[in-house]
Image (tube, helix red, strand yellow):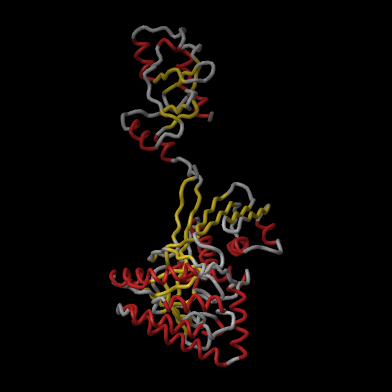
Amino acid sequence: MNQLVRSQTIYTHQTILDAVECIESGALQIVFVVDDERRLAGVLTNGDLRRYLLQGGATTVPVTECMNTNYRSVKLGAAREEMLKIFDLSYNAIPVVDVDGFLVDVVTPARLAANQEVPVLARARAPVRMSFSGGGSDLTYYFVENPAAVLSCTVGLYSHATLIPRTDSVIQIFSEDLGTEEHYASLSDLLAHGDKGLLATIVSVIQPNYGLDLYIRSDFPVGSGLGGSSAVTTAVIAAFNELRRDRWSTYEVAELAFQSERLCFGIAGGWQDQYASAFGGFNLIEFKEGRNLVHPIRLEDSICNELEECLVLCDTRISHDSGKLHEQQREEMESKNAQGLLITESVALCRHMHHHLIRGELHDFGRCLHQGWMLKRQFSRAVSDGVLDQIYDSALAAGALGGKLLGAGGGGFFLFFVQPQHRQAVTAKVRELGCRTTDFRFESNGVTSWRTKIQ
């Protein structure tokens, strides 16, 4: 019970004179009468008291003789709207009682207006990307000397982050995807830890000045080739951003995601995944030594809907390590000048596919997917193998116009362009080979964050 309640409360066995003294010493011109167990029994206002005394009432009798038992009160946790309506009926103080009728607080219009902020938690979700062409050109060692561009979109498969600030300095991280938990006594403890996972690395980059509980879960498997680690990183950064006063821009969120994932945690790879997940939608992303630029693509609804119907997303159920693949690709590129020429050709194909896409020339777009896969297979020996080649060749034999393995290669998801009359045959064939098709929808939004009250 707070000081205001104590100062305005008397017991049922006290006298009316006690009530007069309580009213005169307080600012509310009201007293709340409670029984010996502090259950609210009645209310006595200055007006009630004056009327009683004018009628010749005695001051030595118990306060119960003139208290008002027909009072207005609210339950603990009552909505602001309910209290505002009571105040609008000319009440200047409202007693607050718990479920057992005990008086626990008194609310006035001024105290309601100056109500303390309640604790909040932050949530964010970031979509994964589906890259159509240009992959490999987003690697820094390539685009510092060569024009680079990637054509991609995002789909409705997300990484979800929940960030709950704590009142102490403890940092706890929970990954539903990996089934892991990390516990640190403080940020200093986390920073000093020598073998941090990706999530702890992100926190070390952000360096929050409060303790927290961080929860992560994803709609996609680890090693999918959909840029999943970047979606995770982007979602976590966006959750922190939701609690900032000077919020980072979308470009800054993508840059922080790259910093955390590539530089600090050490996963080798390019820049496209972070930008795609942060911005969302269909984009042509250009990479330059100075600034990276995201060019949103506006598609007619009919084009977008038709493309969505023509694409088959196929999980090979073969996991891969994109970081190791990128490291191997870089080593092979440095030893063979022809690798740079292949990526240059891939960037030129990316420009063609961009034109086909915005004009709705989807048949040509599908055939370009095949050309891009033929180029990508030459990037590194690790991009494909006999099993993956069999899946791809079988899909084409069943009617697919083209396709590609998403991500760096070596496993994950195949994306096939299939006309409607061949879709059933293609899906049946890849399932025979142990694959699983996954339904999806394009996602026009990038990372999204919001806050909600902690109940």
Q: Is residue 334 above or below residue 418?
A: below
Q: Is residue 220 above or below residue 78?
A: below
Give the camera-side residue of 412 and 94: 412
Image location (x, y in percent) of residue 30? 42, 23
Question: Outermost residue, bottom direction?
Answer: 337
Indicate left or right for 196 with 153 as reference: right
Quarter of the view holding residue 94: top left
Q: Is residue 206 above or below residue 407?
A: above
Image location (x, y in percent) of residue 417? 39, 75
Query: Residue at left 59%, top 56%?
Result: 175
Image location (x, y in percent) of residue 252? 49, 69
Quarter of the view holding residue 258: bottom right
Image location (x, y in percent) of residue 292? 47, 78
Q: Is residue 39 above or below residue 375?
A: above
Give the camera-side residue of 50 and 32: 32
Give the camera-side residue of 399 and 50: 399
Query: Residue at left 61%, top 52%?
Result: 211
